[in-house]
Image (cartoon, helix red, strand yellow):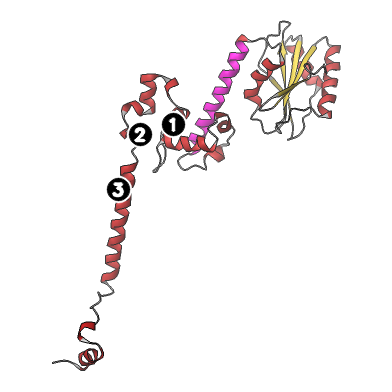
Amino acid sequence: MATNGEWMIKEFYEPDELPEEQPSTEEQPAKQSANDDSAKASKHAERSSEKLSVKQWAEADRPREKLMQRGAGALSDAELLAILIGSGNPNESAVDLMRRILSDCQDSLNTLGKRSIEQLMGYHGIGEAKAISILAACELGKRRQMEEFRDRLDMNSAETIYRYLKPQMQDLANEEAWVLLLNHNFKLITDPIRVSQGGLTETAMDVRMIARHAILNNATIIILAHNHPSNNPKPSRNDDMLTKQIDEGMKLLRIHLADHIIVTEDTYYSYAENGKL
């Protein structure tokens, strides 16, 4: 026998229009949660099938194995750097991560070497130790290049001096002044010596400090060099004044100022080549 409530529902709706029985409010969250879990599992499976870890690659494609079998020259920059950092992040292998970082650096190791530790640590998967390893590798590359120049070249031309100093000076954020101490055959006596460090636009050079380094190392020829972070090689009035002061001071000591080179990332300015020494 129908209750009053059932009779009222049947009176209001036609037989085919009776509302379907709705699940209880307790059942709905459980079903929704199950659907969400299923969707997440499906997406995770798709990602897993698309990306393999380095260990799952063919042996010939793994950076370390590739280096052992074919030599370091067969590896890309990203693969060599991946060996240094060892691992990537949950979504990228070490190689993929370094490819992305290099891409942000216009695929330039020179640009990568200018990144700070903090900038590199901005990438997921790069901690302080990995960032330091990357910058250390870039610095070693520069020093190797400098050794090659130092061992085989005479510092008797502005272009040679520029090629020697560029790897060291092109990344400097502030102006710095360095002096090269040479013997009478234009051979380097020591590594370049920094004689001053200034702001973004100028630096001051102490004639007495330069003279002291030259005398202590028995140098008969010196070459002055400083960088322009602005990448504009044109000398300033202050550059001209300092060059004149140092030239006059060295003449009193019978030390020859052979050149003053302004170093930028793309080119250089030579006082000797421009007839100003």
> How much space separates mark 2 and mark 3, taking CA atoms?
18 Å
- Badge 1 is on which residue? 82
Of residues 17 and 150, which is closer to you in this image?
Answer: 17
From what the image shows, is residue 100 above or below residue 168?
A: below
From what the image shows, is residue 161 above or below residue 32?
A: above
Of residues 216 and 165, which is closer to you in this image?
Answer: 165
Amino acid residing under circle 3: Ala
Residue 24 x/y as whole percent = 25, 75
Residue 99 x/y as whole percent = 46, 35
Residue 97 x/y as whole percent = 45, 37
Residues in magenta?
127-151
- Badge 2 is on which residue? 54
> How much space separates mark 1 and mark 2, taking CA atoms?
10 Å
Amino acid residing under circle 2: Val
* Numbered disc in front, either 3 or 1: 3
Amino acid residing under circle 1: Ala
Quadrant assignment, res 89: top left
Q: Is residue 130 visible?
A: yes
Please tell me which residue is depicted at 73% across the width and 35% down the height of the picture.
200
Please tell me which residue is depicted at 56% across the width and 26% down the height of the picture.
139
Q: Which mark is residue 218?
A: none
Magenta region includes residue 142: yes
From what the image shows, is residue 187 above or below residue 266?
A: above
- Badge 3 is on which residue? 45
